[in-house]
Image (cartoon, grey):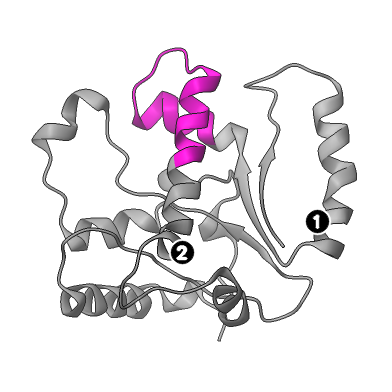
Amino acid sequence: MSTYSVIPSPKVSDTVVEPYNATLSVHQLVENADQCFALDNEALYDICFRTLKLTTPTYGDLNHLIDAAVCGTTCCLRFPGQLNCYLRKLAVNMVPFPRLHSFMIGYTPLTCLGSQQYRAITVPELTQQCFGAKNMMCAAGPRCGRYLTCAVLFRGRMSSKEVDEKMLNVVNKTSSYFVE
């Protein structure tokens, strides 16, 4: 079973029981889910406010980011292609121990609506942004810990060779952030 769990934040909602319910549900996620993709309302709010330049983000704006993240992580299931895989195959490769199955989602490109049409995104820029703290949909600082594993899913027209080269560069430059 794969879940997308939205973690509450006081920046978004002041409902008293949200953190309590989230705390109670963590045990069930650890015990019963095979993969848990963590989406943090605080990180989503910060993305809307800082990166997308929305002065007062609404639930619709936060839901749009969640939609993009879910769509991006499940696109390999919905479209045929040489890199098509199943979530089960992803879990086998990414979960080293059964209880360590929580994933942080980094989504890129994140640009303001007004500047999207004027911006050409390159593979080096995409690979650099996907590991940036500003693009993580969970408020945990990726540079404060270590990555156990990593999967990057690219969509669109780009050279597989260029993607492989740039990902190898990222792994070599940031090897201190990965567990060996």
Tag 1: amino acid: Leu
Q: Residues within 10 Å of mark 2 (few under 14, many from 20)?
A: some
Relative to 176, is 29 on the left or the right?
A: right
Which of the 4 image quarters holds residue 2?
bottom right
Q: Nearer the viewer, residue 108 or 129?
A: 108
Q: Position of residue 1 (x, y in %)?
A: 72, 62
Q: What's the magenta region?
A: 44-67
- Residue at 86% in and 42% down: 23
CB within 8 Å, label 2 to label 1 = no
Q: Is residue 78 above or below residue 21?
A: below
Identify the residue at horizontal 27%, vertical 35% (top origin): 111
Most prominent secondary structure in the magenta stretch? helix
Nearer the observer, disc 2 or disc 1?
A: 2
User: Measured from the top left, where is residue 172 in percent x and y?
Assistant: 34, 80
Residue 83 is tagged as: none
* Residue 77, numbered label: 2
The amino acid marked with disc number 2 is Leu
Mark earlier in primary sequence (2, 1): 1
The crowding category of the residue bearing disc 1, from other C-alpha atoms within 10 Å (few below 14, some 14 to 19, many at least 20), is some
Judge whether residue 133 can be spotted in this image.
no
Q: Name the element at disc 2.
A: helix
Residue most extreme to the top: 56
Q: Nearer the viewer, residue 10 or 154?
A: 154
Residue 161 point in image, percent of width and height: 17, 80
Q: Position of residue 99 (x, y in %)?
A: 79, 71
Q: Secondary structure at mark 1?
A: helix
Q: Is 96 on the left-hand or right-hand side of 130?
A: right
Q: Is residue 152 visible?
A: yes
Task: Place residue 14 in its image quadrant.
Answer: top right
Q: Is residue 142 above or below residue 166?
A: above
Q: Disc 1 designates what residue?
A: 29
- Check the image and report above or below for 107 versus 167: above
